[in-house]
Amino acid sequence: MDRRKLIAFFAMVLGMFMSILDIQIVSASLSEIQAGLSAGSDEIGWVQTSYLIAEVIMIPLSGTLARIISTRYLFAASAAGFTVASALCATATNIDQMIVYRAIQGFIGGGMIPSVFAAAFTIFPPSKRAIVSPIIGLIATLAPTIGPTVGGYLSHAFSWHWLFLVNIVPGIIVTIVAWNFIDFDKPELSLLKKFDWWGLFSMGVFLGALEYVLEEGNSNDWFNDHLIVIGAIASAVGAMVFFYRAFTVEFPVVDLTAFANRNFALGSIFSFVMGIGLYGLTYIYPVYLSRVRDYDSLMIGETMFVSGLAMFFTAPIAGKLSTIMDLRAMMVLGFVSFGAGTYIMTGITVDWDFYELFIPQILRGFGLMMCMVPINNIALGTLPPARIRGASGLFNLTRNLGGAVGLAIISTVLSNRQDVHYERLREHLDWGNPTAVDQLNSMTSNLNAAGLDGATGAIRQMVNLVTQQAVVMSFSDVFLILTVLFGLMVLGVAMIEKPSPQITGRSGGGH
């Protein structure tokens, strides 16, 4: 294997790692940033939302940009821009600056993610896929999983500025290496004349507004909020214009023809569901640990680290198995493991902490890697090299959109089911329930003994207890829904055509 290509590839992988990590690194430390910038609680969420909206627009666009200006220029510019934007984020003095800088960071950083997938499937012969595919799968899934740990540690040990400053040195290294070592393709500047600006604009509106609706919908009460309604209409109109342009213009901004390849289309659906599992569980565990168990960001990180370790140790096994095992059987194994992990979690109670979460986290980490490697190989492994750049952006987009849809559904289910459970529990807590009355009386006498207003305090404690139980029961509901989803995916694997041996066996594909 050419050493220059390997060095270039590892620099690209590091760039992708930084870009994906940056979403989750900040999520664990939003309260510190909020305090540092004296922002309102309704504004701070935009630090994440602006990054995600910008990134979702760039990811599918990157394939076209790579064709026009070449992978080398695109990746080096993305890495350099991402580094500069990270430095700007660290210098932000108010929330408005931070939101703008984060949008720039997300947009530019989004160019690095699909380039790595495209490079892996074009510059390496299929015989090397067993090594390359797990590396990418590991980075794409490990970064969101360990993000909260790294973020919690940095903001505890130093300050929130370091969430961004930590990108600068690796960013400079990646930029220099990418500029000097990437030479997989040549620019086709003549395509600029045919560039579909209307397609780009409509795609931006379609994906940006969709991401906004999914991200903000639950907290703003969905379609009772006029901005959400406007966002949904804008997204629908943008989608119609975008799809019309994509199928009628000579050089569309995103090449959708890859979906005609059955395995790519199915791989993208699986990738979408993996997004739900990956980002959904990375979100729901910390919410439980902070809301119910009162963990701080560092303790949450230490608990979540288990699935990161499980992925790390599973990656080489998944790589080896992908050469000797039917990829579909691997996916079934992965989905079953994932489903088993969420099924165990349906028994969650108020007292669960590190030890109860240990096995479900290992099953989740193992399942993720067992699915990720075959899904990447099935989706991108059968496409001709010329099509991979565009297809890679679409494939990564499905994972991000899966994450956005998953988070929107999970947060909605959590709040709705919490209300339902609260009402049900409240119905049983009346003066005719001797257990409840005994509990209330003992709380009252304890508080009176401590010299407090026993009657009022006891009722408040009772309300808190019921609320906490309702919260935990709503978590159980979410885990049940995820278990059913992964069970259905096991059936979905049957629809995939048996991947031809050429995915793992043929030579070529490089330039």
Image (spheres, rainbow, N blue to C red):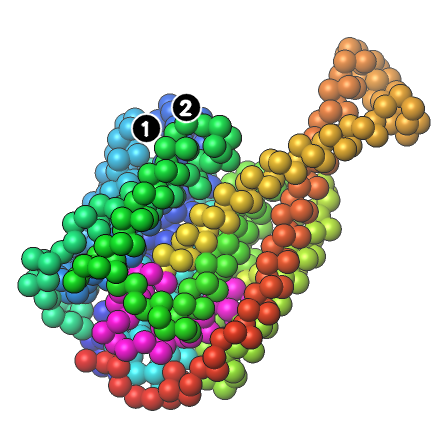
Amino acid marked by disc 1:
Ile
* Majority secondary structure in the magenta region: helix
Report the span colored magenta.
366-395
Quadrant showing the C terminus: bottom left
Badge 2 vs badge 1, beta-carbon distance below 8 Å = yes
Q: Quadrant of residue 484?
A: bottom right
Q: Position of residue 321 (x, y in %)?
A: 51, 81
Q: Position of residue 231 (x, y in %)?
A: 37, 36
Q: Earlier in the sequence, mark 2 or mark 1?
A: 2
Observer-nearest of 130 and 153? 130
Q: Which residue is mark 1?
A: 95
Q: Which residue is mark 2?
A: 40
Q: Position of residue 498 (x, y in %)?
A: 48, 82
Q: Residues within 10 Å of mark 1 (few under 14, many from 20)?
A: many
Amino acid marked by disc 2:
Gly
Q: Quadrant of residue 95?
A: top left
Q: Is residue 350 magenta?
A: no
Observer-nearest of 508 and 31? 508
Q: Disc 2 on helix, strand or loop?
A: loop
